[in-house]
């Protein structure tokens, strides 16, 4: 079993910095008050996880985050019996803990998880809001403060890995994309410490590279990669080295494509 990243609930005292693209903060708060589950969709590195951390802190709720992967089963989320000094003891998984304690349970990249995961989510995502635990013969009723948030990247969808309509139609959904240019510059400058005027050319390059998505590239440059690039430059790395290490190498292994991207970079910067 692979370890579950960030499964320990975090109660944040500082509110993580988040620049909204629209009305998503109000919508999130309303969904929480109305006890509706939320689906966030959008490309990798565009701010979904930061948004959830920001909202959890703003609402004063514990956040239980699970990064889903292709070995993740329902039992990893709900819990299992473990051997402890000759005894068998039940250990709650992160979803069960969130339902018992309340707060936000965030399942990042839900489509990566095994199919049986959706089965445990269904009774939690309708008006029953229950989590049946067959192995302990319990049926947990989610408290009012509990909210289920899941995310996925529609760009990665294949026929094998997609969210079934019967699952996705249980969520209120918000679509995420990269921020408008001035806001994205503000985010990258704030996260990296590089001044706005030095971030702007990186943004212009990122936009040109994003336009190549679907042709030579599977994914465009994310805001996360832009933050990496600007942080390297702020730390004294040369422009070309920083761009190569954070905006070209992470996108492709193909030598010809890399060369072409570097030419685009040299022509833009
Ligand atoms: P995702 O969960 O969509 O893959 P993240 O939330 O991890 O992406 O975002 C990656 C990084 O980009 C964040 O750590 C943060 O530095 C930055 N970021 C992206 N969007 C925003 C935003 N709207 N406000 C603040 N920071 C952002």
Image (tube, rainbow, N blue to C red):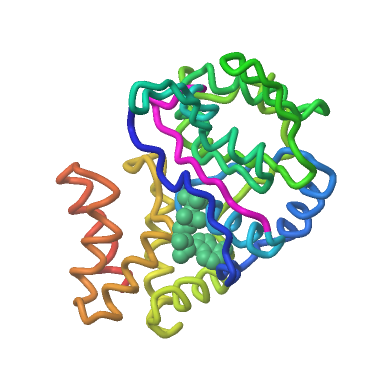
Q: Is residue 2 left or right of residue 180?
A: left
Is residue 39 something that shows in the picture? no
Q: Position of residue 94 (x, y in %)?
A: 53, 37
Q: Is residue 222 left or right of residue 32?
A: left
- Seen from the viewer's position, the closer of residues 269 and 33 is 33
Residue 218 falls in image quadrant? top left
Which residue is painted at 33% across and 27% down in the image? 85
Query: Among all residues in the image, which is located at the extreme front?
Result: 86
Is residue 122 something that shows in the picture? yes
Q: How many marks?
A: 0
Q: Position of residue 182 (x, y in %)?
A: 56, 74
Which residue is painted at 46% across and 25% down in the image? 89
Q: What segment is highlighted magenta in the picture?
A: 61-74
Q: Position of residue 244 (x, y in %)?
A: 22, 62
Which residue is painted at 44% across and 73% down in the image? 191
Work out whether 197 lies above or below 79: below
Work out whether 11 lies above or below 35: below
- Seen from the viewer's position, the closer of residues 17 and 4 is 4
* 71 magenta-colored: yes
Q: Position of residue 201 (x, y in %)?
A: 39, 75
Query: Among all residues in the image, which is located at the extreme left?
Result: 255
Residue 99 falls in image quadrant? top right
Which residue is painted at 58% across and 35% down in the image? 95
Q: Is residue 74 left or right of residue 194?
A: right
- Seen from the viewer's position, the closer of residues 93 and 261 is 93
Quarter in which the C terminus is drawn: bottom left
* 214 magenta-colored: no
Work out whether 156 lies above or below 242: above
- Seen from the viewer's position, the closer of residues 262 and 110 is 110
Quarter in which the N terminus is drawn: top left
């Amino acid at each position: 079993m692979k370890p579950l990243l960030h499964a320990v609930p975090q109660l944040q005292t500082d509110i993580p910095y988040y620049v909204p693209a629209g009305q998503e903060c109000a919508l999130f708060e309303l969904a929480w008050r109305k006890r509706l589950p939320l689906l966030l969709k959008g490309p990798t590195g565009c701010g979904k996880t930061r948004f959830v951390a920001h909202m959890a802190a703003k609402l004063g709720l514990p956040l239980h985050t699970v990064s889903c992967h292709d070995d993740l089963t329902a039992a990893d989320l709900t819990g299992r019996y473990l051997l402890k000094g000759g005894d068998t003891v039940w250990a709650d998984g992160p979803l069960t803990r969130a339902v018992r304690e309340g707060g936000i349970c965030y399942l990042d990249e839900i489509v990566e998880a095994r199919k049986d995961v959706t089965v445990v989510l269904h009774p939690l995502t309708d008006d029953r809001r229950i989590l049946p635990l067959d192995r302990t013969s319990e049926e947990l009723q989610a408290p009012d403060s509990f909210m289920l948030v899941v995310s996925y990247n529609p760009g990665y969808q294949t026929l094998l890995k997609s969210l079934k309509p019967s699952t996705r139609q249980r969520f209120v959904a918000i679509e995420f994309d990269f921020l408008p240019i001035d806001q994205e510059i503000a985010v990258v400058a704030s996260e990296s410490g590089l001044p706005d005027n030095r971030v702007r050319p990186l943004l212009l390059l990122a936009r040109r590279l994003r336009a190549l998505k679907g042709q030579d590239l599977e994914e465009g440059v994310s805001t996360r990669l832009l933050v990496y690039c600007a942080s390297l430059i702020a730390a004294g790395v040369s422009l070309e080295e920083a761009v190569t290490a954070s905006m070209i190498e992470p996108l492709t292994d193909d030598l010809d494509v890399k060369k072409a991207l570097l030419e685009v970079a040299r022509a833009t910067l």
